[in-house]
Image: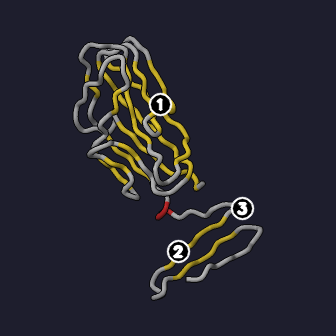
Amino acid sequence: MANLKLKNPSGGSLNLVSADGASDLTVTFPATTGTAMVSGNMPAFSAYQSASQTPVGTAFTKLTINTEEFDTANCYDSSTNYRFTPNVAGYYQVSGCFNLSGASVVVAAIFKNGSAYKWGGNSTGATLYGTSVSCLVYLNGSTDYVEFYAYTNNEASMTVTNNATNTWFQASMVRAA
């Protein structure tokens, strides 16, 4: 297939028609220079924790976010490493939330390539503690990955809640590199 170059400095739309003429796709281009993305190449996932987990007190513990709600490009590992490794380079919005009973300080953290990247914390006097973290991160589309970790300063036995509304992890591509 040859390369096709279109030029329209004011932006606009392009209709692409399949070879059989049965279906088409409209791509809208911005007026500024950039990469046009279509949903087929923008990785995104959402997953939650469906089993109880007791984090290690005073240490970061990777959460076993093991149930996928969706994974558009098969980039989230929900059974072994519990990490998102997108196959398209770009900027990703990454978020996670968890609730924990019996702690006094809790921290939610996004780890990039095995190291803490961004975190958010919460400290309250209730019996159920919750915290979340959200960040924008560049991922190279081949080897970069992100994971979701929990931290607490309480060494007593605690349990991370295990349902789709309380403990979740998700990411979505915002724009290509």
Amino acid type at mark 3: Thr
Q: Residue furthest bottom?
A: 20
User: How far, Cα to Cα, is label 2 from label 1?
Assistant: 41 Å
**Nearer the observer, disc 3 or disc 2?**
3
Looking at the rendered structure, the secondary structure element under dot 3 is loop
Instruction: Name the quadrant containing residue 48.
Output: top left
Q: What residue type is labelled 2?
A: Leu
Image coordinates of residue 82 in percent, x first then y, are: 33, 42
Element at label 2: strand
Q: In the displayed structure, would residue 91 be above or below residue 106? A: below
Relative to 124, say whether 35 is above or below.
below
Vertically, is 91 above or below 36? Answer: above
- What residue would you read off at disc 3? 33
Q: How far apart are marks 1 and 3 (CA)?
A: 34 Å
**163 on left or right of 20:** left
Numbered mark located on residue 25 in the image? 2
Q: Quadrant of the C terminus?
A: bottom right
Q: Which residue is drawn at 61% across and 64% down?
A: 36
Q: What element carries label 1?
A: strand
Q: In the image, is 18 to the left or to the right of 166? A: right
Q: Which colour scheme is used?
A: secondary structure
First in residue order: circle 3 vs circle 2: 2
Q: Looking at the picture, which amino acid does disc 1 mark?
A: Ala
